[in-house]
Image: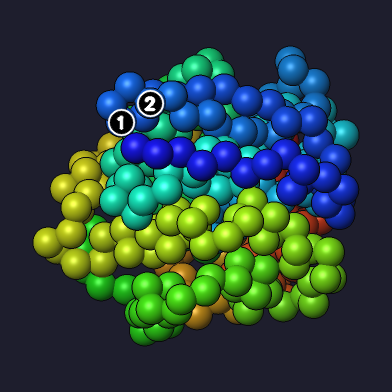
């Protein structure tokens, strides 16, 4: 496994992203040590809030939510998945598997020794984060899922199929353009450039390109069995569980219902549809999401 590391100066003076980097290491394949970056903001003794991003974004997605939640007294942790942001980037598509990414983020979670976590899981942050909840339920106090699923090989939406074909066929992935395509708010040129910052050239984009193909939408794909086992664990999860999907996301539309129906902790919760938001609702409605997270914590403490 060959790792690429984005030069630090690519992250200089990004709009609204002046957070001090925080690094730890996890074990990769063949003894390789992988550096994982996370924003770690707010009081260290505050209740931990874990914000997990998906593909092709990184912790920059949460830049307008992190200060808001930190001011409310939360310890806010926003890791960059391996292959994204300031984390190390395995250079070959074959280096990226669903099970490896679950293992790497599991190592990161245990290494931080986090307990009483409120998790906000979005996109691939849900596919990975829900596996962590299933594996380590005692470490989580409550969970919020947004525009995500935990698929078990039963197909996906037509919009996802188009997204899969595009990411596997286009010779040049423009990360900022991809984020803008499913965000209602018009991003500034500086924000668009910030989403591109972790990826100096195509060699750094094995993660963003590979993640779409890793979603287990067919019964013969890897991780179907592991996700089915995770569902069995989640079907015993009685801690507060909330869905907060946006009203304008063709890829995950309707995906909130399966969580509401199958997870005991979701029953009777004030599930939300976030109005006026695309797939990246952190860009479109960050203040609304912070209010939702804080209210959920306050009413389920």
The quadrant of the image that shows the C terminus is top right
Position of residue 215 in the picture relative to residue 91 (left or right) = left
Q: Position of residue 108 (x, y in %)?
A: 49, 26
Label 2 with label 1: CB-CB less than 8 Å? yes
Is 167 in front, or is 239?
167
Q: Is residue 21 visible?
A: yes
Q: Residue 106: which quarter of the image? A: top left
Q: Position of residue 187 (x, y in %)?
A: 79, 71
Alpha-carbon distance for marks 2 and 1? 6 Å
Position of residue 74 in the picture relative to residue 279 (left or right) = right
**Residue drawn at (69%, 60%), measured in percent from left and top?**
195
> Quick one: label 2, few (<14), some, or many (20+) residues within 10 Å?
few
Q: Residue 12: which quarter of the image? A: top right
Q: Is residue 114 above or below residue 289?
A: above
Snapshot colouring? rainbow
Residue at the spot of label 1: 29
Q: Which mark is residue 32?
A: 2
Q: Is residue 177 above or below residue 265?
A: below
């Amino acid at each position: 496994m060959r790792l690429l590391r984005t030069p630090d100066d690519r992250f200089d003076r990004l709009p609204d992203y002046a957070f001090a980097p925080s690094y730890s290491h996890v074990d990769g394949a063949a003894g390789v040590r992988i550096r994982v970056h996370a924003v770690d903001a707010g009081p260290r003794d505050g209740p931990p809030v874990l914000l997990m991003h998906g593909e092709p974004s990184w912790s920059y997605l949460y830049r307008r939510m992190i200060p808001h939640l930190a001011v409310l007294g939360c310890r806010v942790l926003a890791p960059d998945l391996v292959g994204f942001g300031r984390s190390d980037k395995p250079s070959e598509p074959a280096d990226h598997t669903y099970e490896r990414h679950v293992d790497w983020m599991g190592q990161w979670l245990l290494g931080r020794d986090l307990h009483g976590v409120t998790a906000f899981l979005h996109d691939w942050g849900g596919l990975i984060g829900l596996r962590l909840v299933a594996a380590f339920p005692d470490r989580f106090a409550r969970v919020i899922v947004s525009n995500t699923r935990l698929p078990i090989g039963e197909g996906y939406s037509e919009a996802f199929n188009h997204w899969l074909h595009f990411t596997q066929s286009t010779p040049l992935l423009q990360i900022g353009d991809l984020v803008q395509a499913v965000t209602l708010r018009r991003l500034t040129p500086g924000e668009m450039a910030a989403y591109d910052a972790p990826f100096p050239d195509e060699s750094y984009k094995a993660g963003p390109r590979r993640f779409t193909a890793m979603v287990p939408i067919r019964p013969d794909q890897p991780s179907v069995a592991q996700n089915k086992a995770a569902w069995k664990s989640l079907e015993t999860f009685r801690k507060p569980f909330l869905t907060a999907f946006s009203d304008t996301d063709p890829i995950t539309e309707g995906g909130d219902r399966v969580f509401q129906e199958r997870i005991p902790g979701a029953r009777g919760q004030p599930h939300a549809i976030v109005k006026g938001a695309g797939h990246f609702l952190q860009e479109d409605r960050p203040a609304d999401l912070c209010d939702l997270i804080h209210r959920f914590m306050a009413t389920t403490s």
